[in-house]
Image (cartoon, rainbow, N blue to C red):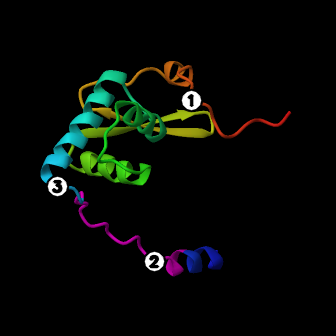
């Protein structure tokens, strides 16, 4: 009981994150957000990796890295242009981005879409 109390008293609160601002010119920002929004609207809920593959297929020149795209996705989520959905599949979680007005498909449809878990059961 004493160790539990010490454990909780010793933890620091998580610092508040400041608002995220993209580091693009306004016209570049509009092009990038429109492209990502159209991809998510057309292809349904996608993970970050799937979204990055689609962005590369489309050929958005202004996005040079996956980290940059993650920041744009987070900014769009803060501005309520996108929402993030979490699917629990057994012990695994899968976070997907989607537009606000699309229905999230069933878990079976998402799993059959080619997304493979990095964990495998040992026999």
Graded by Cα atoms within 10 Å as few (under 14), some (14 to 19) or many (20 or more), the crowding at tag 3 reads few
Estimate the x, y position of residue 4 in percent, counting from the top left: 61, 73
Q: Which residues are magenta?
A: 8-22
Estimate the x, y position of residue 25 in percent, counting from the top left: 16, 55
Left or right of 7 in this view: 14: left
Q: Secondary structure at mark 3?
A: loop
Which label's residue is closer to the chain start, 3 or 2?
2
Question: Which residue lies under the disc numbered 2?
Answer: 12
Which label's residue is closer to the chain start, 1 or 2?
2
Q: Residue 70, relative to residue 91: is it above or below?
A: below
The circle drawn on residue 25 is 3
Q: Where does the N terminus fall, quadrant-wise?
A: bottom right
Graded by Cα atoms within 10 Å as few (under 14), some (14 to 19) or many (20 or more), the crowding at tag 1 reads few
Estimate the x, y position of residue 18 in percent, counting from the top left: 26, 67
Left or right of 101 in this view: 58: right
Query: CA–CA distance between discs 1 and 2?
Result: 36 Å
Q: Nearer the viewer, residue 90 or 69?
A: 69
User: Marks 2 and 3: in contact by CB < 8 Å?
Assistant: no
Nearer the viewer's eye, disc 3 or disc 1?
3
Query: CA–CA distance between discs 3 and 2?
Result: 37 Å
Q: Secondary structure at mark 1?
A: loop
Q: Residue 120, relative to residue 5: is it above or below?
A: above
How many callouts does the rendering have? 3
Query: CA–CA distance between discs 3 and 1?
Result: 34 Å
Q: Nearer the viewer, residue 105 or 37?
A: 37
Graded by Cα atoms within 10 Å as few (under 14), some (14 to 19) or many (20 or more), the crowding at tag 2 reads few
Q: Secondary structure at mark 2?
A: loop
Q: Nearer the viewer, residue 82 or 36?
A: 36
Q: Nearer the viewer, residue 116 or 27?
A: 27
Look at the magenta stretch and give its main secondary structure.
Answer: loop
The circle drawn on residue 115 is 1
């Amino acid at each position: 009981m004493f160790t539990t109390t010490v454990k909780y008293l010793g933890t620091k609160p998580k610092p508040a994150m400041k608002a995220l601002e993209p580091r693009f010119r306004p016209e570049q920002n509009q092009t990038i957000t429109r492209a990502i929004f159209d991809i998510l609207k057309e292809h349904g809920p996608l993970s970050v990796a799937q979204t990055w593959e689609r962005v590369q297929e489309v050929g958005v020149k202004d996005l040079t890295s996956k980290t940059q795209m993650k920041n744009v996705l987070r900014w769009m989520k803060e501005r309520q242009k996108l929402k993030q959905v979490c699917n629990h599949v057994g012990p695994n979680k899968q976070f997907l981005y989607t537009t606000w007005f699309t229905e999230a498909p069933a878990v079976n449809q998402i799993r059959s879409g080619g997304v493979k878990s990095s964990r495998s059961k040992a026999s």
